[in-house]
Structures are given as C-alpha cells and as structure tokens.
Amino acid sequence: MPIRILPPGVAAGIAAGEIIERPASVVKELIENSLDADATVVSVEIQQGGLQSIRVTDNGAGIPEDELLLAFERHATSKLISLEGLSQITTLGFRGEALASIAAAAHVRMTTRTASAQAASVVEAHEAGIKLQKRQATAHGSTVMVEALFSTIPARLKFMRSSGAESARIRQVIEHMAMANPSVRFTLKSEQRVIIQTSGNGDVRDVLGHVFGSIAASEMLEVTASPRAQFSVLGMIGQPSQNRPNRTGISLFVNGRWVQSLTLSTAVREAYRGLLMEGRYPMAALFITVPPEVVDVNVHPNKREVRFTNDGDIFSSVERSIREVLIRAHPQVQARGLFVTAAEDSRSMPAAARAFDFTVSATSNPTEPLPEPNQTSGDTSLVKLGPDGAPETLLHQPVWDTNELRVLGQIAKTYIVAEGQEAMHLIDQHSAHESVLYYRLLRQWENMLPDVQPMLDPLPIQLTPEQMETMVLAQDTLARYGLALEAFGDSNYLLRSVPSMARRIDGARLVQDVLDVVRGAGISRAGAHQVIAASLACHSAVRAGQALDQQEMEALSKALITESNPQHCPHGRPTIIQVTTHMLEREFGRV
Ligand code: ADP
Ligand code: MG
C-alpha cells in the first residue's frame, strides 16, 4: 500500500485509545477537569460499569459558551500556552486531549454554566461532529454525560471485563481522587446505588476510612516530613501488621496527582525492611510535594507515570521519612535491631541459631542444606515447588522416627522446645501449625469433604478490580475448601461459610488476601488449589508471639509428627530443627 495520511476520524480514534483505555479512564479525565475548575463537589453516576453511561457533575467554574466548541478540539486547553510552561504545570490536565478523545470514542453531552452566564450552554459531540444545543437552566458548574463508550471502537469493547470489574476500577479512581482531595465531596453511584461518598471535610483519615476500613485507617501512622524546602512527604502509613501480599495497598501522589512510580513504591517497601515477612507489602497513602520542575508528568498520554530528575534523592528522602515514623511508633524496632538484613529475614531463623550446625530433621542427611524458602521470589508463589513446577507432593508416610516428644516449654512465645530421641527439638509454632493445617486441607480437598463453618450472618466483602477478576476464576475452588461466596451487587461478594479452622479470623481479610495471593501465583496454573490451601493454612495457624499452654504445645507437636510433613511448612520454611546430643557433646567439648 502507498503511504497516506490517515483520515482524521481514524487518527482521532487511535489517539483516543491511548488516553481512554476503559470506562475508568473517562472518569479520571472528567474528574481531573472538575478539579482543575476548582470544584468542591463532584458526583459520578454510572450504568453497567460505565459502558452504558457515565455522568460527572461538578460545581466548578464552567466554560463560557464562546469557548465550548473549542474545548472539544484536540490540543485545545486553557492550562498551557508554551513548552516552557510544561515544567511549571500545576494543573492535572494540560494536553487538551481528554474531551476530544472521549468524543471520538462515545456520545458526549456537556452542560456547562459559568457564574456570570444567565443559563447553561449545551453541546453534543460524537464521532460525526459537534453541535450546540438549546440552552438550559441549571446551577453553575458542568455536567458531562458519556454514553455508549467504545461503540465506535469495537476492538476496544472486546477488552472490557465484566461491568462489576469495570465499576470496581471506577471506584478505585474515585477513592484515589478523594484521597488527594479530601476537601472535595465525592459521590459515586452505580445503577442508582451509592457506592462511595466522602464528606469533603478535609480530613484524609476520613477518606482512608472509606478505602481501607475505618478501623484500619484509625490505626495508621501519620507521616509529616519536609526533608528540604519545597519538598514534603505527608500522608498515612500502615502498621507493620497491616500488611498485604501485593502493592495494591500503596497509593502514591506527586503534587496532587495519583501516580505509578517504581522509585516511590520501592522506597516505601524498603522503609519496612525487616518488619514484614518475605513477599508482604505495607499499606500507605503518601502525598509527595516537589518543585514542579523536578518531575516530568508528560511521560504517557494518560499522565499516570512520572519521572524525577533526582531519583536517588527522592528515594532516600521518602524511605527515611517513613522509617523515622516507624521507629518512633515502635522503639523496639531500633533497640532490638529488628531491622534485620534481607538474608536473615528470608531464612526466618534467629541469627544466633545459625551459628550451630542444625540439621532439619532426624532422618535427613546432616550435610543436606536447609530447604530453601520460597524458590520463586516475591509474592509469586507461596508453595514450595518441586522440579516440575508443581507443588511438592504430600508425604503420607511420616518420615519421623520419634513417636513421642517430651515438651519442655516455649521460647520467645514462638518456639516449642522438646526432647526426643537423642536430640533436642525446636519447633516453630506458626510454621508447624501451618504445615499441619495445610495437609489437613489437602486431604479434605481430595476427599471432597470440606470441614465447613457456616456464617451466622453472611459477611459482605468489597473487592478490588483485580480481586473481582480472580474471584470469577477461583470461586469454585474456594467453595471446595469451604469458602462459599456469592456475587452481590457491584464489586461485592457475600461470604456464607469458611473452613472451620478459619472460623475465628477476619473473613474479609482472609478472602481478599487469598485472592491476591492466587492472582500473584497465576490461577490458571495447575496446582493453584494448593496455593489456596497454603494461604488458608497461613491465615488460620497460630501466630508467633502467642503464649501456648502445655496441652496445646503437646497437641501441636503430635499433630506435626503424625499428620504433616514435619520438615517444612508450605512456604518451604523449616517447621522443626534439631540439636542432637552428639552436637551438644561436641559443642561442650565432651568428644
Ligand atoms: P485539558 O484538561 O488537558 O486542558 P480537556 O480536553 O480535558 O483538556 O479540556 C479542555 C478544556 O476544557 C480545559 O482546558 C478546560 O478549560 C475546559 N474544561 C473541561 N472540562 C471542564 C469542567 N468540568 N469545568 C470547566 N472547564 C472545563
Ligand atoms: Mg483534562
């Protein structure tokens, strides 16, 4: 084919695709416009996850009628006049592409009135063109109605998820806009039901209550640091105990803009080093203010990515600001040197203990190395994988030659000390219990007989877009383990039963966490059900730091030996280590 300039409609459609990826992108662009127009009230109403319709209403400045048609032209903006101005930009928009892109992908009707105008001007725009309509009487501000999104771009329509998943993404956009603008009152309605409504009272903690739950939000710690003039790090960070299996609890804002930045999210995670287990991520909502010229916001048409001219500086300042807050809140963190190095952390063994030549179990070869924790890095897999990539198989035959352990006591409320044949045994109570529960769950799975505890009142659980997608795939598997879930309204599920072993724990957190872990591991992979079992076991197992009485310790030791693979938990960490009397003799110079 010869080279040709694309017809304007095709070019517009292609350009629109970059900015308007899905309904949530429309919502984001329209809210940005409302905020740039100094609105204090922004209401969003959607139908069918925004695919049928999205309406955004604000009480902002409005557009004068003589500029209204221009606003829909590509590269038409009131926010930027020169290239130099780009480095000083303080508005959310500046590319002048949003209204043009939305009109290229959908049917748009905008009603807008400035404070000085007598009536509102109305304009309708779609693929075929744009036309002023009859004026209307309304309050000042703007309303943009977007209908039949992507009807002009069928290829894009194919990529849309269920309307529940799309509306969950829209909720996520509104939550973030509200976090960054606590003085603005936001409402989201889906199919006429209120999904989220913020007060606009200026308190970020209030907004975080809507996002993370009010109890979680009340426990979060405040960061107020200002490492340099014109550079501040404000916000709220989670306690180490409020951790998650992925980054979704970390929300980052730069100069009021919700952004994705590997520099910043890594800095947040680094600050928690040694306080979180391998593969866990903290929660945080951080608002970073820097002089506009050190940040490039024009990396991508959707303006979600940013780059800093002084990456390293930003990284260490953010990390230090968070770490100082953590140390202040948990003085023992510093005093006891809890900021252990990564190597110690991933081994999950006290450093002192490793000076001994501990073997893993009575039957294993003493020269054999400890089982590696998590072979794959990060949160991709919880289960120790065999060479073929499948989780290691069940050990039905106990390999243990000690039938009775004489339990002597507990150390640091974490390790059980017991005497067995010719050796002292140290049992990690959490990983041991986890291992027992894991193999119990796998046996129940094989027998199709889950041990189920029905909920007295079904528990509504709100899910993120990613969790919604995973749920659709994992629902049947979860049910076979006793987690009965039922779709309920927009991005909500009702939890009707849990595995009996999990009856005392927070069901919402359990479900969300299991979904995150399953997503990280890849649900389509054979063996995904073992990942679910491992996650359920981990949640239900006794924690480190919990005092156990003699009976409990005896029961746990016995269960470990008779019911599970005694050597390591499903994460691949040791459950039991052993000091033989021979080793003691050697250490004490008796032999
Ligand atoms: P940009 O936001 O990058 O300038 P848009 O296409 O989003 O580009 O909007 C074009 C222009 O229309 C804006 O610069 C602004 O002047 C005006 N505008 C859009 N939406 C609103 C609104 N809700 N209230 C007031 N003015 C608006
Ligand atoms: Mg805009």
Image (cartoon, rainbow, N blue to C red):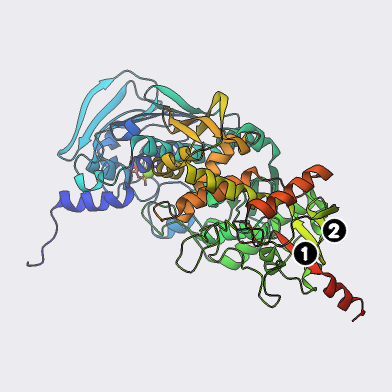
Left or right, residue 561 beside residue 199: right
Mark 2 element type? helix
Q: Position of residue 5 (x, y in %)?
A: 13, 60
Query: How packed is label 1: few (under 14 Cα within 10 Å), some, or many (20 or more)?
Result: few
Instruction: Name the residue: 28% across, 20% down.
Output: 136
Of the two numbered discs 2 and 1 on the same chain, state the one appearing first in sequence. 2
Instruction: Name the residue: 43% across, 37% down.
Output: 168
Quarter of image, res 157: top left
Per the rendering, the mark at residue 335 is: 2
- Residue 474 vs 570, above or below: the answer is above
Quarter of image, res 473: top left
The quadrant of the rendering that contains the C terminus is bottom right
> Ligand 2 near label 2 (Cβ, under 8 Å)?
no
Q: Quadrant of ligand 2?
A: top left
In terms of depth relative to the viewer, which is nearer, 69 or 391? 391
Left or right, residue 373 beside residue 578: left
Q: Are marks 2 and 1 in contact (CB under 8 Å)?
A: no
Instruction: Name the residue: 58% across, 60% down.
Output: 266
| Amino acid type of the residue that numbered disc 1 sits on in the rendered structure | Pro
State the residue position of label 1: 350
Quarter of image, res 356: bottom right
Residue 325 appears in view: no
Q: Position of residue 476 (x, y in %)?
A: 42, 39
In terms of depth relative to the viewer, which is nearer, 102 or 485? 485
Mark 1 element type? loop
Q: Position of residue 322 (x, y in %)?
A: 69, 54
